[in-house]
């Protein structure tokens, strides 16, 4: 008799359900998030369990890794794609787990990619770097805002980095409280610079671009760190059958829903990989700064829309270009990407 299992995973407990081939509940119980306990409950059914569906929540690493180590076939559930009949009056954790096991038995369970454990540490380190980079940008924008509001003058990023006691005093006009606010942002900014540099140094020592991803370095705006970020977040490119699938995964595609020439609403804008989306936006900023053709494209878009939409348009172009570069293993051609 074939059995199908699902685990509804929460922060401190999990609901384990096992169904037979007729959707009859063989086992159903809530357990604390302790791997030995869950493995002990699964052990009597191990030979008959075809696969185990695990929700893709923020804390799935320990459970999926532990189950796979014990020889179970694990399916990581794409929870955003799971549909449940909305006419139900009552649902609970047990119902959710049974539904996942039911979809698993039918072979229609939406699943996500289980990133290899051995590569996950570097990927998470790059994600930490991206978080610190965003924090650094916040400090820069805060200083620029303080200067602009209180002096009517503008200061660019290079100017912010070069600030010292004398220049801060000039911007503040003798206001010690304002000077303290700027110095506080500046101290945090320099601390973040130091930590980001350390993370980049460690990443470059511990990981290298795989041969099939080295062509990313030919793309304008993408250096070793962003290249590795894209490599780690994209994973196996064979997952993406078409360029549109990759662009959608990178959140570069509009989520609007249209019918008969009219907008009827929006789909889930958060579907996809937010870290990959961030990487392509970062690449777009650099590409616009250093490539004349890309800058011209950006300026045309900006004239029709705004800076944010124009930057996303460049990011979309770069994402599509990277797909072809990686699939065809050919260098980046700006004329082809930004015709």
Image (cartoon, rainbow, N blue to C red):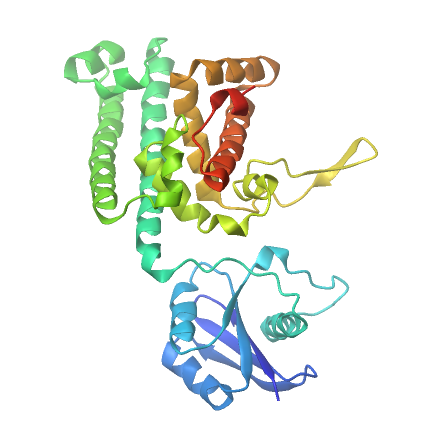
| Camera-side residue of 196 and 185 | 196
Name the residue at 31% across, 36% down. Answer: 224
Residue 301 lies left or right of residue 32; in this view the side is right
- Kindly indicate the quadrant of the structure image that contains residue 258: top right
Most extreme residue toward the left is 165
> Relative to the observer, which residue lies in front, 154 or 220?
220
Q: Image point 47% across, 25% down: which residue? A: 333
Q: Is residue 115 above or below residue 198?
A: below
Query: Quick check: 16 above or below 332?
Result: below
Can you give x and y, in whole percent of width and height, for residue 200 in the image? 25, 40
| Residue drawn 47% across the image and 84% down it | 42
Q: From the viewer's perspective, is residue 142 above or below residue 54?
A: above
The residue nearer to you, when weighing 156 against 211, is 211
Q: How far from the left and from the top, in percent, is residue 17?
A: 57, 79
Quadrant for the C terminus, please. top right
Answer left or right for 74 relative to 199: right
| Horizontal relation, residue 194 to residue 145: left or right | left
Could you say where residue 337 lies in the image, as x and y percent from the top left? 53, 25
């Amino acid at each position: 008799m074939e059995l199908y299992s699902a685990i509804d995973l929460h922060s401190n407990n999990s609901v384990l359900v096992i169904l037979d081939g007729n959707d009859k509940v063989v086992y159903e119980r809530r357990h604390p998030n302790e791997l030995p306990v869950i493995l002990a409950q699964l052990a009597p059914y191990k030979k008959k369990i075809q696969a185990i569906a695990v929700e893709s929540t923020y804390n799935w690493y320990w459970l999926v890794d532990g189950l796979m180590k014990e020889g179970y076939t694990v399916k990581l559930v794409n929870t955003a794609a799971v549909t449940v009949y909305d006419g139900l009056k009552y649902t609970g954790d047990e119902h959710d787990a049974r539904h996942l096991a039911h979809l698993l038995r039918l072979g229609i369970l939406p699943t996500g990619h289980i990133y290899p454990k051995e590569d996950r540490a570097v990927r998470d380190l790059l994600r930490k770097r991206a978080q610190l980079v965003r924090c650094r940008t916040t400090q820069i924008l805060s200083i620029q805002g303080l200067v602009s509001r209180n002096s009517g003058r503008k200061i660019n990023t290079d100017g912010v980095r070069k600030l010292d006691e004398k220049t801060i005093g000039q911007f503040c006009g003798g206001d010690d409280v304002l000077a303290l606010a700027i110095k506080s942002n500046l101290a945090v900014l320099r601390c973040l610079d130091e930590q980001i540099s350390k993370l980049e140094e460690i990443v470059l020592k511990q990981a290298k671009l795989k041969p099939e991803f080295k062509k990313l370095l030919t793309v304008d705006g993408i250096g070793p760190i962003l290249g590795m970020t894209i490599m780690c977040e994209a994973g196996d490119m064979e997952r993406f059958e078409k360029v549109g699938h990759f662009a959608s995964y990178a959140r570069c595609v509009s989520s609007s829903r249209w019918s008969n020439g009219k907008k009827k609403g929006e789909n889930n804008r958060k579907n996809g990989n937010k870290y990959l989306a961030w990487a392509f936006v970062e690449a777009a900023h650099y590409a616009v700064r250093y490539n004349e053709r890309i800058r011209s494209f950006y300026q045309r878009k900006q004239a029709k829309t705004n800076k944010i939409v124009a930057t996303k348009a460049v990011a979309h172009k770069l994402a599509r270009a990277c797909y072809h570069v990686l699939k065809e293993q050919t260098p980046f051609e700006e004329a082809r990407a930004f015709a």
